[in-house]
């Protein structure tokens, strides 16, 4: 699997996890803007920063009881 495919898989997992979350709560907990999360969830943002991905993975991993 290439680095690009790994990134796509990570992004797809995050998008799926955001579908049933209250974005305002996630944004507040991660220190990210609501519109960033909305655009990411809805597929409008296809190249999130490392910081955005790291914060979301840490938050969602903690919520799901596992780390990525």
Image: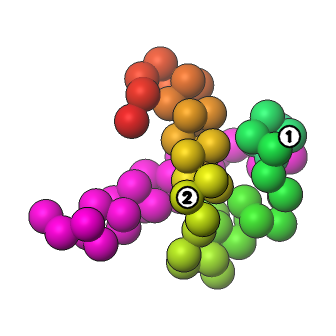
The residue range painted magenta reads 1-24
Identify the disc placed on residue 38: none
Disc 2 versus disc 1: nearer the observer: 2
Give the residue pinned by disc 2: 50
As measured in the structure, the alpha-carbon distance from the residue carrying label 2 to the one carrying label 1 is 18 Å
**Mark 1 sits on what residue?**
28
Residue 64 at x, y percent in the picture: 50, 25
Reply above or below: 33 against 57: below
* CB contact under 8 Å: marks 2 and 1: no
**Quadrant where the N terminus lies?**
bottom left
**Residue 7: % across, % down:** 36, 63
Frontmost residue, 1 versus 40: 1
Against 5, residue 9 (above or below) is above
Judging depth in this view, the residue of 46 and 20 nearest the camera is 46
Name the residue at 76% across, 65% down: 36
The residue at 62%/33% (across/down) is 59
| Secondary structure found at label 1 | helix
Helix, strand or loop for the magenta stretch, by majority: helix
Instruction: Mark 1: give few (<14), some (14-19) or many (20+) Cα within 10 Å.
Output: few
Q: Is residue 28 above or below residue 50?
A: above
Q: Is residue 17 magenta?
A: yes
Badge 2: few (under 14), some or many (20 or more) residues near its Cα, within 10 Å? Answer: few
Q: Quadrant of residue 42?
A: bottom right
**Position of residue 5 measured from the top left corner of the image (x, y, whole percent):** 26, 69
Q: What coloring was used for the rendering?
A: rainbow
Q: Earlier in the sequence, mark 2 or mark 1?
A: 1
Which residue sits at x=72%, y=60%? 37
Quadrant that contains the C terminus = top left
Q: What residue do we see at 63% from left, 43% from top?
A: 55
Secondary structure of the residue carrying numbered label 2: helix
């Amino acid at each position: 699997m290439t680095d690009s495919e790994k990134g796509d898989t990570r992004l797809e997992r995050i998008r799926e996890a955001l579908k049933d979350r209250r974005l305002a709560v996630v944004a507040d907990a991660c220190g990210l803007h609501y519109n960033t999360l909305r655009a990411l969830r809805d597929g409008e943002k296809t190249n999130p920063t490392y910081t955005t991905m790291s914060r979301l993975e840490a938050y969602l991993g903690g919520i799901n009881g596992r780390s990525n």
